[in-house]
Amino acid sequence: MNSEWWHKSVVYQIYPRSFQDSNGDGIGDLQGIISRLDYIQALGVDMIWLCPVYASPNDDNGYDISDYYSIHPEYGTMEDMEQLISEAANRGIGIMMDIVANHTSDEHPWFIEASKDQNSPYRDYYVWRDQPQNDIQSIFGGSAWEYSKETKQYYLHMFSKKQPDLNWHYPPVRRAIYDVMEFWIEKGIKGFRFDVIDLIAKEIDKNIIANGPLLHPYLKEMYQEVLEGKGIVTVGETGGADVSQALLYTNPDEKELSMVFSFEHIALDEVPGKQKWDLKPLNLDDLKQVNSNWQNCLADKGWNSLFWNNHDQPRIVSRWGNDTEYRYESATMLAALLHLMRGTPYIYQGEEIGMTNVSFTDLSSYRDIETFQMYKERIEKGFSHEEIFESIHAKGRDNARTPMQWNSLPEAGFTKGIPWISVNPNFVDINAEKDRQSEKSIFRFYQKLVNLRKNSDLIVYGDYQLLETEPEIFAYTRQWKNEQLFVFCNFTEEIVDCSLLPSGELFLQNYASSPLAGKLRPYEVVVWKKTSIKF
């Protein structure tokens, strides 16, 4: 495979609303991010993925865009955005913009004009029908069709009714999105993350929502029209993609996307065929099989994204780890497991200090539209308040959206005002300042992982092989030329036997004392390196 600059890169995802407030209004902003560039640079990452900061009514926290060419006043100005791009670049950090190409806000000028008249030149920018064509449900709950009394037709919205879906089959829509991309490339950004990009080519009258037959031709067109020769990295959110589909997206010969986000490993605690709120126990063997399948199937063609968390997912240390007694051990073990695999790792803000899920007890403490919709629907179906909150605490998106915990000052140093969503009460014990001063620093462990990737072809390009070992252990090898890594991770709170533990050069561990012979301590990761001599 040809080497690309992003193969050795690590991306840091920022949810701007919750990262750092600079003006006391309780909402994170661009100047806040600029003020924390020293912190991001110290972590060692070379790209920031910025969740949407465009003009928006914020029905879905910025994923309902009303103007792709301007910045929401809550976040700052275009001058602030240009300053962030410039100052980040001076530190060797690129900016990845989030592009929402499947839908706009209903307050976007395109939709406002489209809604006025069936003969509007913008009418075909969206999907309209005289009657709902089917019983397709919105991902946020309820029908995906909304009646517009102005023109007496229904429009399609796969998310909120304030997020009408664009009609990608209409060439001016595609051109309009390409123009947006070109605008931001000229501003100096280095990457795009495409929100729900697998939905853009839907064939609604055939009940095809994801992976429509024209999806790949459209992505090839986008590459040719905008991306070719620009050195821009792209990642597509393709939640339902399997490895065969991921190969189509990411094979460099196909010229579509650099990598994709698939959620197969994220959905392992969900009952198949049900909503994400219907929980089942996590099974480590499932995680081994899913991750190994993605590692091996994209080994020769294509490229992996590696992630545990994002703005839509609960905190990994609360999900697969122990977020109290063994928070440091489980956070670092999970980090090593992921970052030593093949692909481009993504760190979500707060992951690098072991931030945890939040357990608000009152619905009014939450802010996510998806949570409110789910609560309403489940109460109507007879679920108890306690049952619903068990799901919210486990899977709610606001777990990832509570403010970044910087220090033990009021509101965790996020704002001098009242935050838009409450800070997790554990910020006094879990914050960036305290972690970086600790002997057991999760931040410093992430620093080490980022640096290892930058300096090791073994980590970036080595072959992957799952090791069959005890059921409580996830173990694998990486092989590159005459070098080999052996990665062993204990997913339990117990000391477990590990018959396969090798010897060699101790490459990485998350305990201060030497590894035990033939055993792994709670949430321990031990990585051995071997080099064979060739004559």
Image (cartoon, rainbow, N blue to C red):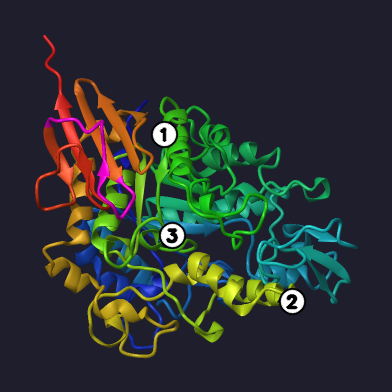
**Front residue of 113 and 374:** 374
Q: Give x and y (percent) for residue 469.
A: 34, 33
Q: CA distance from mark 2 to mark 1?
A: 42 Å
Based on the picture, tell me whether residue 499 belongs to the magenta stretch. yes
SS class, disc 2: helix
Disc 2 vs disc 1: which is toward the camera? 2
Contact between marks 1 and 3 (CB within 8 A): the answer is no
Q: CA distance from mark 1 to mark 3?
A: 20 Å
- On residue 310, which mark appears? 3
Q: Give the main secondary structure, helix, strand or loop, of the magenta stretch.
A: loop
Magenta stretch in the rendered image = 490-504
Residue 10, relative to residue 439: is it above or below?
A: above
Q: Give x and y (percent) for residue 426.
A: 31, 78
On the image, numbered disc 1 is attached to which residue? 295
Horizontal relation, residue 294 to residue 439: left or right: right
SS class, disc 1: helix
Quadrant the C terminus occupies = top left
Residue 4, relative to residue 355: is it above or below?
A: above
Local packing at callout 3 (Cα closer than 10 Å; few below 14, some 14-19, many 20+) is many
SS class, disc 3: loop
Which residue is rendered at x = 71% and y = 38% of the image? 213
Residue 521, relative to residue 316: is it above or below?
A: above
On the image, numbered disc 2 is attached to which residue? 380
- On residue 476, which mark appears? none
Which residue is rendered at x = 71% and y = 68% of the image? 111
Three-letter amino acid code at the position of disc 1 = Gln
Disc 3 vs disc 2: which is toward the camera? 2
**Front residue of 471 and 46:** 471
Three-letter amino acid code at the position of disc 2 = Glu
Residue 449, relative to residue 224: is it above or below?
A: below
Local packing at callout 2 (Cα closer than 10 Å; few below 14, some 14-19, many 20+) is few
